Image (cartoon, grey):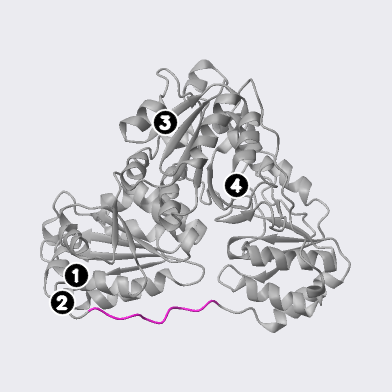
Amino acid sequence: MNGAESMLETLANNGVEVCFSNPGTSEMHMVAAMGKSSRMRSILCLFEGVCSGAADGYGRMTGKPASTLLHLGPGLSNASANLHNARKAYSPVINLIGDHATYHKKYNTPLNSDVVGLAAPVSHWIETVADAATLPAAAARAVQAANVHPGQIATLIIPADCAWNDSTAPLEAQDMPESLRVPVANIKQTAALLRNGKTTIMLMGNTALTEKCLELADQLSQATGVRLYCDTFTARLPRGAGRCSIEKLGYFAEQATEQIKDAEQLVMVGTTAPVGFFAYPGKVSEFYPADSVLHTLAEVQHDAEQALTDLVAELDAGKFAPRRIKLQKPQLATGELNLKAVGQGFAALLPTDAIVVDESATSGAYTSALSATAEPHDWLSLTGGSIGYGLPLSIGTAVACPERKTICLQGDGGAMYTNQALWTMAREQLNVCVVIFANRKYQILQIELARVGAQSMSPRTLDMLDLSNPDLDFVKMAESMGVKATRATTADEFNQQFEAAMQTPGPRLIEVMLD
């Protein structure tokens, strides 16, 4: 058994079942090993940023790592933007990076690079394999590193000869790291804050945003009056009928500061104190009042559910039944196609247990607001701010949960970063509906142009934020990659096309034409 084969068996023994691949010459023995294996599903992606985004989506929905297979430093660099997003989402991901054979590195050939240096900004753990005999153990350590709560990016660099030389036996299942418990003293300190009668905000994020954690937080809110908010961008948020409600903190400073302007105390659970996404001239970076008390119940690496459970017990809040959202769907719109009409159709026709991947940017206000009382669903956001995540993430969610419909709400600008994902959706016949908001501009950047004080609105300035001349055609683009596609120009057309997509398995794209 060579190194690649033993590594692959070790990964499979430790729960890694999927590899999103874009390999090159240095990875051919790993490709061959996957070809022989019935335990590792290999999914070809036509760009490395699709591989990393798909692994992020898979990790968010399963809580366990998928792997990526990437070609040397340039392949890792192509994957880095969506690895950045995955890192901010605390998704577990294992990168398998091929490198030149150990004896070939000294020649500094064209593809040679500092792979460790390139991996460092987007990895929590990095290891370069020394020889084939140590590769299986290194693979086991990579799985353990990726499974550090709530999830980490582990990068394993594998010289080609370490993959093709004879190796040792695969390692069996290893013990995985446990999440950290919040000490009793902190539970009691937090309880004292919630009892003191001051206006208190509880801000929740990451693994504190499970269905169970939201129920516990709602009980605390009833018992103490604490107001509940979540981060603006969340890795995964349960929403809709039957779930407990939580208010999302606004993106712009003037929104968020207004929401929490009277807060005397902020308690953070699985997140940090709220600050602006960017700095703006003349505007504050911190959203919370300057004299407010900041307290952390649970850091992101802690077991948030344990902390909230213990806090509910400490405050005798368990006697309150969680208040659950009642199903309420909007009426379908007719006639003119605008963002509100799309939001109405989306919320009315959203199926039970859908997974919504949101990269709609400025086009998504109505889809989010109107679906708050729709059928129960999960909402996944752009955690790291690097656009081009929506289509790849949808691959990962659909692979992770094939029985559930994934809906990708996607701006046209972001879609052009990783449109290769459509090909993989077609090849794997994934259960994804992509809704493209075609406004033919970087609308968010036109807004930001004014907000940062760059007042030039000349034709030359706006041209740099415009996606027309020539116009993009996502119907033709999708069809060329094997995805059935339609174009909606009225509310009635969108409703018909979206309803059909919800009732039909497999990939589908709807291009929503906006003025």
Look at mark 1 in the image and give the residue it sits on: 5
Q: Is residue 294 visible?
A: no
Sequence-first disc among 1 and 2: 1
- Crowd tier of the residue under label 1, counting other residues whose Cα lies within 10 Å: few below 14, some 14–19, many 20 or above: many
Residue under the image location 32 percent in, 35 percent down? 482
Q: How far apart are marks 1 and 2 (CA)?
A: 9 Å
Q: Which quadrant holds the C terminus?
A: top right
Q: Which of marks 4 and 2 is in front?
A: 2
Sequence-first disc among 4 and 2: 2
Sequence-first disc among 1 and 3: 1
Q: Which quadrant holds the N terminus?
A: bottom left
Look at mark 4 in the image and give the residue it sits on: 277
Q: Is residue 287 above or below residue 224?
A: above
Range of magenta residues: 170-179
Q: Position of residue 283 (x, y in %)?
A: 69, 42
Q: Would residue 37 appear left or right of 330 to someone viewing this image?
A: left
Q: Nearer the viewer, mark 1 or mark 2?
A: 1
Q: Distance between the residues labelled 1 and 3?
A: 40 Å
Q: Which of marks 1 and 4 is in front?
A: 1
Look at mark 3 in the image and give the residue it sits on: 485
Which image quarter: residue 213? bottom right
- Given contact means CB atoms under 8 Å apart, are the residues at marks 1 and 3 in contact? no
Sequence-first disc among 1 and 4: 1
The question of residue 34 being in magenta is answered with: no
Q: Is mark 1 on a helix, strand or loop?
A: helix
Look at mark 2 in the image and give the residue it sits on: 167
Q: How far apart are marks 1 and 4 (CA)?
A: 44 Å
